[in-house]
Amino acid sequence: MIAEIQKRPFARPLLWWITGILLQTCLPCRTAAALLLPAFLFVISSVAVSYFGKPLALCYSTRWVWGMLCALLVISLSVAVTEYVERRIPSTGEPAGLMPAASRSQQRLTESVDRLRLMDTEKSVFAALTIGYRKAMPREMREHFAVSGVSHILSVSGFHVAIVCGFLGLLLGFLPHGNALHWLTFLLQIGLLWGYVLVTGLAAASVRSALMLSFYLAGRAVRQTADAYNTLAAAAFCMLAYNPFYLFDIGFQLSYISVWFILYLQPVLQRLISVRNPLLAQPWSWITVTLAAQTGTAFLCLHYFGYFSLVFLFANVPVMLYSVLLIPAGLLWLLLPDGMPGYALLQLAVEKLTCYTVDTVDLFGSLSGAAYPLRFDTVSLSAGYAMLFLALLYLSNRRPRILLASLSALLFLLLYSLATTQ
């Protein structure tokens, strides 16, 4: 585990930064912590220099001291930034920064949705799928999406941004591949990608995905490969450095934990069954991605929403298929002016795909027993993830004591659930 973290330089600063955020928000340290930690750094460095009798830079055996100093420095900076952002949050709860501009852009795009020949419920689903506007969606439809296990489709997330990025790459792929045009294509793709994230409300999940794709595209532009876990940690660090309170955003938590489980668990699931038929390989890939993401987010969904979908695997495949076609077609329809050649045909395709999506969600969401009601509190959530991560750690190194710890966490979770439900 330590060796894996050492190969990814953003992992340790991210852990230290999160520690500082939790210190500032959970403990009454406030300004005192921001002042005491730098003083503590100075004391430790002074004692270490006097103990070894020479500068720390010349002592290779004291590299742990430098590591501790760096950790305390990052934690101290995180505490200070968290307190600064906390004091800047308006008491009225009004959005700050780019959020007002993003909301206005999103509102302007929703005005075009009324041109669709659909019912109001279907229009609200289309607006949520394409630009993340969910205010007009009826509560019953939201519940159907949640019960079906496809509520992640409603919020602009990594799935949406990846589709848009792939569509942009397909459009820009027809440009010549010279050196200057190579960088022009890169800048256009990055600019259009972040433009989409801006007009869809700057949701935490979409910002995460845009950051990761930006790092990936930048690496490809300079002919370098990037480690997916390090890119994930770098994106999280950048977001939390800008706004530490992203850590408590539901979309942030669900997005990062689902991506981590997809990166770690999906290749394992993919290897369980070797699918060589190209017509079946892509659906099998979607199934394994869904299983990996659902495994990682199941406990969080029980904590926040209070039930677990039993039909998510059956509902996700058709809904994802429709969304892959609907999102780029819908965005293109929103951006094109009325009356252009092919506009009516594109509108018809958008309307049909929206109807298919709504019908599928209604079908699975209205099934009896489609979701199991169960709510996790903080203790159950912690025990559940402890059991899950210990089980994954056991699968990688096969140590009996780790298996025993995982089973102990599972036993505690079961006993605690029985005690709290009585």
Image (cartoon, rainbow, N blue to C red):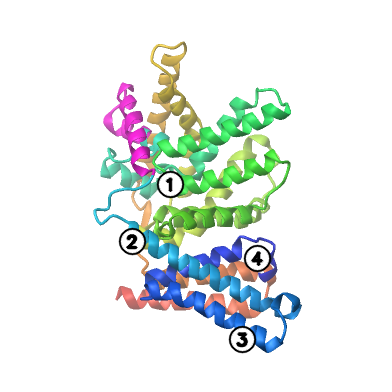
Chief secondary structure of the magenta portion? helix
Relative to 19, residue 182 above or below = above
Residue 371 in the image, given as x and y percentages of width and height: 37, 54
Identify residue for label 3.
47
Q: Compute the Cα span from label 1 to label 3.
A: 52 Å
Say the numbered circle drawn on residue 5.
4
Identify residue for label 2.
87
Q: Secondary structure at mark 4?
A: helix
Is 87 one of the magenta-colored residues? no
Q: Compute the Cα span from label 3 to label 2.
A: 35 Å
Residue 112 in the image, given as x and y percentages of width and height: 33, 25
Are the two marked residues, 3 and 2, in contact with CB atoms closer than 8 angstroms?
no
Q: Nearer the viewer, mark 1 or mark 2?
A: 2
Residue at 74% over, 80% down = 61
Q: Earlier in the sequence, mark 3 or mark 4?
A: 4
Identify residue for label 1.
152
Are the two marked residues, 1 and 3, in contact with CB atoms closer than 8 angstroms?
no
| Segment colored magenta | 98-126
Q: Earlier in the sequence, mark 4 or mark 1?
A: 4
Q: Earlier in the sequence, mark 2 or mark 4?
A: 4
